[in-house]
Amino acid sequence: MADVRRDVSISVVVRIDRTGNWVDWSTGHRSVPGVLAVAESIVSLPAIAEIRFDRITRTTERLSLHDLASEETAS
């Protein structure tokens, strides 16, 4: 059987008030409390107009030789 693992990380992205550009502030967070701590530490900075959180998901499928043979036979 295929083993499917989903890796999820969260990035804190900010919009700079003066330019309107979005910038990755910090990336690779694995927990919501960690992301919220970052947001709380930067929310009062005058240069920050807006904060958003991007969830990044990477799916990895692990297949055995039996799974591959079964897929090839089915097609």
Image (tube, rainbow, N blue to C red):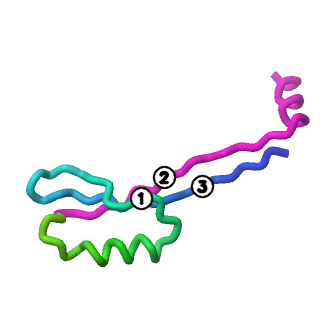
Q: Is residue 45 above or below residue 6?
A: below
Circles 1, 2 touching at the beta carbon (< 8 Å): yes
Can you identify the residue that label 2 sits on?
Answer: 56
Start-end of magenta stretch: 49-75
Specify which label sits upstream in the sequence, 3 or 1: 3
Q: Is residue 1 left or right of residue 10?
A: right
Residue 19, image x, y percentages: 11, 51
| Three-letter code for the amino acid on which mark 1 is drawn | Thr
Can you identify the residue that label 3 sits on?
Answer: 7
| Three-letter code for the amino acid on which mark 3 is drawn | Asp
What separation in Å lies between label 3 and label 1 (alpha carbons)? 14 Å
Can you identify the residue that label 1 sits on?
Answer: 27
Q: Secondary structure at mark 1?
A: strand
Question: Badge 1: few (under 14), some or many (20 or more) residues near its Cα, within 10 Å?
Answer: some
Question: Badge 2: few (under 14), some or many (20 or more) residues near its Cα, within 10 Å?
Answer: few
Specify which label sits upstream in the sequence, 3 or 2: 3
Q: Look at 81% across and 22% down and name the residue there.
A: 75
Specify which label sits upstream in the sequence, 1 or 2: 1
Q: Is residue 51 left or right of residue 63?
A: left
Q: Secondary structure at mark 3?
A: strand
Q: Look at 85% across and 39% down and name the residue there.
A: 64
What separation in Å lies between label 1 and label 2 (alpha carbons)? 10 Å
Circles 3, 2 touching at the beta carbon (< 8 Å): no
Residue 65, image x, y percentages: 88, 34
**26 inside magenta stretch:** no
Residue 69, image x, y percentages: 88, 29
Q: Secondary structure at mark 2?
A: strand
